[in-house]
Amino acid sequence: MYTDKVMDHFENPRNVGELEGADGVGTVGNAKCGDIMKMYIKVADDKITDIKFKTFGCGAAIATSSIATELVKGKSVKEAQELTNKAVAEALGGLPPAKMHCSNLAADALKKAIDNYLGLETKNECEDHHHHEHNDFDHGCSI
């Protein structure tokens, strides 16, 4: 069901933790499945010099958070803003359809952290994140 890369990032997640004095912090969540992601970024010379995450959720949520941090570390803020859920899922070698929403959350948490860094106001995704294309059964977040 999961690729070896998904399992590797779940069992050995990269960049886990909090960043003291982060330049930007973004939190998103999905109330239906219970996944919550928080990303912290440090920026210098318009580049993401450090990034960490804390995720409460299923294996796919942890893996997508981990790979997202690897994909943007060292990139410019503009490049990081362009990270898509499709790129996150592809970097992991794919995700089961019922878990694709986890890649959305990882990309959204990063975008919220960047918006926070840029001083842009955004609404609370923990309450507003919805995926109407799936029924409730699809939101089960167990590995």
Image (tube, rainbow, N blue to C red):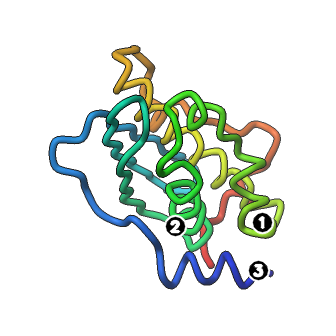
Real-space CA distance between mark 3 and mark 1, rounded to the nearest whole angstrom: 8 Å
Q: Nearer the viewer, residue 114 or 47?
A: 47
Q: Where is mark 1, residue-wise?
A: 95
Instruction: Determine whether label 1 and label 2 are within 8 Å by CB.
Output: no
Residue depicted at x 38% and y 19%: 118
Quadrant in the picture for residue 46: top left
Q: Earlier in the sequence, mark 3 or mark 2?
A: 3
For mark 1, give the secondary structure. loop
Disc 3 is placed on an element classified as loop
Report the disc number at residue 62: 2
Q: CA distance from mark 1 to mark 2?
A: 13 Å
Q: Earlier in the sequence, mark 3 or mark 1?
A: 3
> Who is closer to the viewer here, 129 or 16?
16
The residue positioned 50% from the left and 55% from the top of the image is: 69
Amino acid type of the residue that numbered disc 1 sits on in the rendered structure: Leu
Circle 3 is placed at which residue position?
Answer: 3
Q: Residue at x 25, y 56 (%)?
A: 18
* Secondary structure beneath label 2: helix
Pointer 3 with pointer 1, Cβ within 8 A: no
Taking the image as shown, residue 26 lies to the left or right of residue 108, namely: left
Q: Quadrant of the N terminus?
A: bottom right
Packing grade of label 2 (10 A; few <14, some 14-19, many >=20) is: many
Q: Residue furthest front?
A: 45
Q: Is residue 130 left or right of residue 62?
A: right
Indicate left or right for 54 with 135 as reference. Answer: left
Residue 115, percent from left and from top: 43, 24
Which of 60 and 78 lies nearest the eye of the viewer? 78
- Residue at 82% x, 40% y is 133
Q: Position of residue 91 (x, y in %)?
A: 73, 62
Q: Is residue 62 or residue 79 the one in the foreground?
A: 79
